[in-house]
Image (spheres, rainbow, N blue to C red):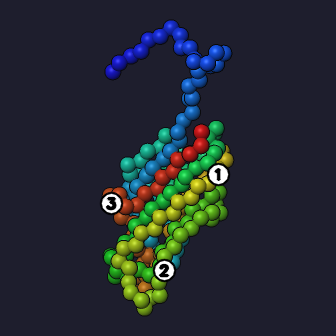
């Protein structure tokens, strides 16, 4: 690696200053570290998203993102989950994912079809939102799934790279 040694850096404009920003680009990422079995018709908070984890500010615990001090701003938050109904009859009929900010739902997306119009073996949901967050605000993601036969709510597999949660601050 090359090194550059200088005694002084002069700006091109007279009287100006050279400023180098020291702001951090806060971000986090995680995939499910273990199989998550979902109960039919029950809201499940997504936890254990620590596989391949990246966490620049210790703000992500695998379930909750908490805005650290001096990091208030505008964020992009995203969750993608693959719901696998194959192990419970391959007859999934509805699934929903929500994003909660400080315990209140702030965004959601869902899929559903009539139970007599076919079956879903595997379904995927993606939820993304640009959101203003203050210091101490928390973000969590939850899912709720159902199948036609009442056999269960499906599962979120680990190690597939098809389920993930991540976010990052987009303003500096």
Q: Return the residue found at the far front.
A: 13
The residue lying at 43 percent from left, 91 percent from top is 116
Tell me: residue 3, above or below residue 144. above
* Callout 3: SS: loop
74, 93: nearer the viewer: 74
Q: Residue sitting at 40 percent across and 55 percent down?
A: 31
Q: Which mark is residue 160?
A: 3
CB atoms of marks 3 and 2 within 8 Å:
no
Q: Earlier in the sequence, mark 1 or mark 3?
A: 1
Foreground mark, 1 or 3? 1
- Name the residue nearer the viewer: 13 or 98: 13
What is the number of callouts on the image?
3
What is the quadrant of residue 19 in the picture? top right
In x, y percent, where is residue 128?
53, 60
Of label 3 and label 2, which has the lower sequence position? 2
Residue bearing mark 2: 112
Secondary structure of the residue carrying numbered label 2: strand
Residue matched to label 1: 132
Q: Nearer the viewer, residue 95 or 170?
A: 170
From the top left corner, tell me how far across and down residue 79 is, in percent: 48, 59
Does 1 sit left or right of 134 as displayed? left
Say few, some or many: other residues with alpha carbon within 10 Å of mark 1 (under 14 / 14 to 19 / 20 or more): few
Q: Position of residue 107 (x, y in %)?
A: 59, 64
Q: Is residue 144 above or below residue 160?
A: below
In primary-sequence order, the first of circles 1 and 2 is 2
Q: Mark 1 and mark 3 in contact? Answer it, CB < 8 Å.
A: no
Tell me how far mark 1 sits from mark 3, CA to CA. Answer: 31 Å
Residue farthest along the top direction in this orientation: 7
Mark 3 or 2: the one toward you? 2
Sort mark 2 into few (<14), some (14-19) or many (20+) by Cα contacts within 10 Å.
few
Determine the secondary structure under disc 1: strand
The residue under the point 43% across, 52% down is 30
């Amino acid at each position: 690696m090359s090194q550059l040694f200088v005694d002084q850096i002069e700006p091109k404009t007279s009287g100006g200053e050279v400023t180098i920003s020291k702001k951090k680009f806060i971000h986090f990422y995680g995939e499910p570290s273990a199989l998550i079995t979902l109960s039919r018709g029950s809201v499940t908070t997504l936890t254990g998203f620590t596989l391949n984890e990246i966490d620049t500010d210790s703000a992500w615990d695998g379930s909750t993102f908490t805005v650290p001090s001096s990091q208030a701003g505008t964020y992009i938050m995203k969750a993608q989950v693959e719901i696998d109904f194959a192990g419970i009859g391959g007859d999934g009929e509805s699934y929903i994912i929500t994003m909660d900010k400080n315990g209140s739902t702030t965004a959601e997306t869902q899929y559903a079809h009539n139970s007599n119009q076919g079956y879903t073996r595997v379904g995927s949901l993606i939820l993304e939102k640009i959101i203003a967050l203050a210091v101490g605000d928390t973000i969590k993601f939850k899912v709720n799934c159902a199948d036609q036969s009442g056999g269960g709510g499906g599962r979120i597999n680990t190690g597939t790279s098809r389920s993930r949660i991540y976010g990052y601050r987009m303003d500096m």
